[in-house]
Image (spheres, helix red, strand yellow):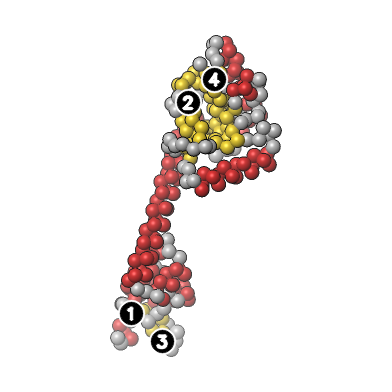
Amino acid sequence: MSHNQYLTTSEFAKACGVSKYTLFHYDDIGILKPEYVNDKGYRFYSLKQFSTFDIIIMLQEAGTQLSEIKEYLDHKSPARFLSVLKQKKEQLVIEQKKIKRMERLLQMIYDMTKNALQVVCDVPFIQEFEEEYLITVALSPEGIEKEDMKNMGEHFDYCADHHIEYTYPSGIMNGKDHLERGVYNKPDFFFNKLVKKQKGEKVHVKPKGKYVVINHKGGYDMLPKSYEVLVNYIKENRLSIIGYAYEQEILSYLAAEDPSDYIIQISIQVD
């Protein structure tokens, strides 16, 4: 090929849809070196190098590191190409699952926050709930924060190791005995809501049925007052506490800067 049939760096870059600095970088790391460099140091590329560029872009868009691409180009073969494509396909499937999970999570948070702005606050009411599945971790009976943080870390590791998919809202559970004794600041469990029904030693089923509910507006320091309102409402309506109290943020630090604007829903199963 005569020299006048080569493309300059700018011409080759324009034809490839990248900047010439990208080609300089490719040259520096050795994955796409110019076909010819003249006495003045100017780089020139041949038409056949478009195929190498296509390979680089395809693998890059599939999430392959440039160092991996160089390794492949240095030892290119049909078998190695199939191996690289299979690996990238598996990685893309994993990424697609992550994206779908994030889409569901963002939609859940969006819906929860939007609905929170429309709820009536600080007034108890009765509501029927459908069955829900929660993944739980026991909290320290003495309320030792260091111990709880350790348990929470192990909880999230457990969920990751067992591929347990959870979503919002998360929250805490207060036992029936605590409610009846007026102890509202020593929760028994932390929970995350599961995306789908499943079994497991850490799975708790929130029963379908009747609950007395209050949407507490304000910080956590004022929660005992809302618990008292709920328990009194239960007594006044001659109802009985038959299960846990479920406490969960529906408008939290994610959307509100001032804790006084938080909305925390408390629901207690009754009969």
The reply to whether callout 1 and callout 2 are in contact (CB within 8 Å) is no
The answer to whether the residues at label 2 and label 4 have Cβ atoms under 8 Å apart is no
Residue at the location (54% across, 23% down)? 243
- Residue at the spot 44% in from the left edge and 49% down from the top edge: 98
Q: CA distance from mark 1 to mark 2?
A: 70 Å
For the residues labelled 2 and 3, the Cα–Cα distance comes to 78 Å
The residue singled out by tag 2 in the image is 207
Q: Residue furthest bottom?
A: 39
Give 111 or 173, whichever is nearer the viewer: 173
Q: Which badge, 3 or 1, is on the more N-terminal residue?
A: 3
> Of the residues tagged 4 and 1, which is closer to the observer?
4
For label 3, the residue is 38
Q: Residue 46 bears which disc, if any?
A: 1
Residue linked to disc 4:
242
Place of residue 248 in the rendered image (x, y in percent of width and height, measured from the top left)? 55, 31
Is residue 260 visible to us here? no
Mark closest to the chain's N terminus, 2 or 3:
3
How far across and how far down the image is residue 62, in percent? 39, 61
Residue depth check, mark 2 versus mark 3: number of the one nearer the observer: 2
Type of amino acid under label 2:
Pro
| SS under mark 1 | loop
Q: Marks 2 and 4, Cα distance to the nearest angstrom?
A: 11 Å
Find residue 208 and report its horizontal and vertical position in percent: 45, 24
- Within-10-Å neighbours for mark 3: few <14, some 14–19, many 20+: few
Instruction: Label 2, secondary structure: give it.
Output: loop
Label 3: state its secondary structure: loop
Count the marks: 4
Amino acid type at circle 1 is: Ser
Relative height, residue 146 to residue 82 (above, below):
above
Residue 138 quadrant: top right
Q: At x 42% / y 69%, what residue is drawn?
A: 69
- Classify 156 as above or below 222: below
